[in-house]
Image: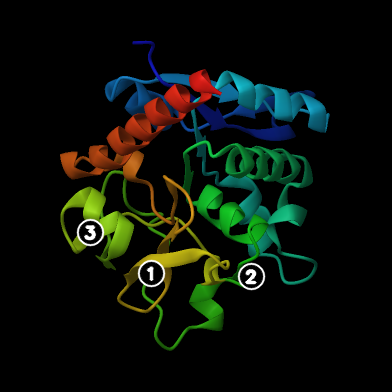
Amino acid sequence: MAKVRVGITSGWEQSSLVPGWSLIYTVKSCIDVVEKVGGIPIILPVMSQTVSRNEVLDAIDALIVSGEVLSIKRNVLKEEGPKDLECQNPLRYANERDYIMGALNKRIPLLGICRGHQVLNVVCGGSMYLDDIHLSQANNVITHQQDDKKPEETVHSIRMEGFLARILGREEAMVNSFHRQSVKEPPAGFDVVACSQDGMVEAIASAEHDFVLGLQFHPEVLPDPVWLNIFKELIEAGARYSSRKGHD
């Protein structure tokens, strides 16, 4: 049986890392974990034409909408101007919007991680806390920015239910945290399947698809092997999608 091909979205930076050069990048750990569970990782480029983005989806069996750091730090922390995900990085947002909507329409299994979780929420009609949650909700919010800790370290607990609890076989876990914005209300047709102790939404799942899951944290770098279950389930869902596609 052919291996499941997992598309991983990329970000782009216009001359901010290397003067004069625009760079495409993604989280290396996403590539590593897909390989580890037996899939083939394929980096999806940031492209200018919608038709090209739609055609790329024909080459994959599952989709990971990845996270990022740079544009969030530039935009969320500023005092004035728009802070929504689209304005933070318009071209990346346009690509991820089309990849997400195309995947949902084709019933391609989808995993959104950190920013990817937030973009999934917005694209599907959910709302966000756009200001830094540590300031706007200062009275009860725990720390969701672990700048002084390594990515593989955990900093707070989450309580899980539904789809995510079934995948992991547990209802509580410790996670890492790298976000300043947060899901406020999930889209119609999505369930909140994890929250932190301060009530922030840590995961959403579609009740209408085989596998559509958004996670506010980064399971791809967490050392506890239980997190591999998410990626194994994504691969299995990708195999089911590939089989259905082959019979269409």
> Which mark's residue is nearer the viewer, 1 or 3?
3
Taking 85 as reference, is 150 above or below it?
above
Pointer 1: what residue? 143
On residue 174, the disc is 3
Horizontally, residue 54 falls left or right of residue 110, namely: right
Hey, what amino acid is under mark 1? Thr
Point out the image quarter for the N terminus: top left
Taking 178 as reference, is 195 above or below it?
below
Front residue of 214/139: it is 214
For the residue carrying disc 2, how many other residues have a C-alpha within 10 Å: few (<14), some (14-19), or many (20+)? some
For the residue carrying disc 1, how many other residues have a C-alpha within 10 Å: few (<14), some (14-19), or many (20+)? some
On residue 130, the disc is 2
Horizontally, residue 230 falls left or right of residue 62, namely: left
Q: Quadrant of residue 48?
A: top right
What is the C-alpha distance between the residues marked 1 and 3?
13 Å
Q: Earlier in the sequence, mark 1 or mark 3?
A: 1
Residue 103 in view in this figure: yes
Residue 18 in view in this figure: no
Q: What SS does tag 1 mark?
A: loop
Q: What SS does tag 3 mark?
A: strand
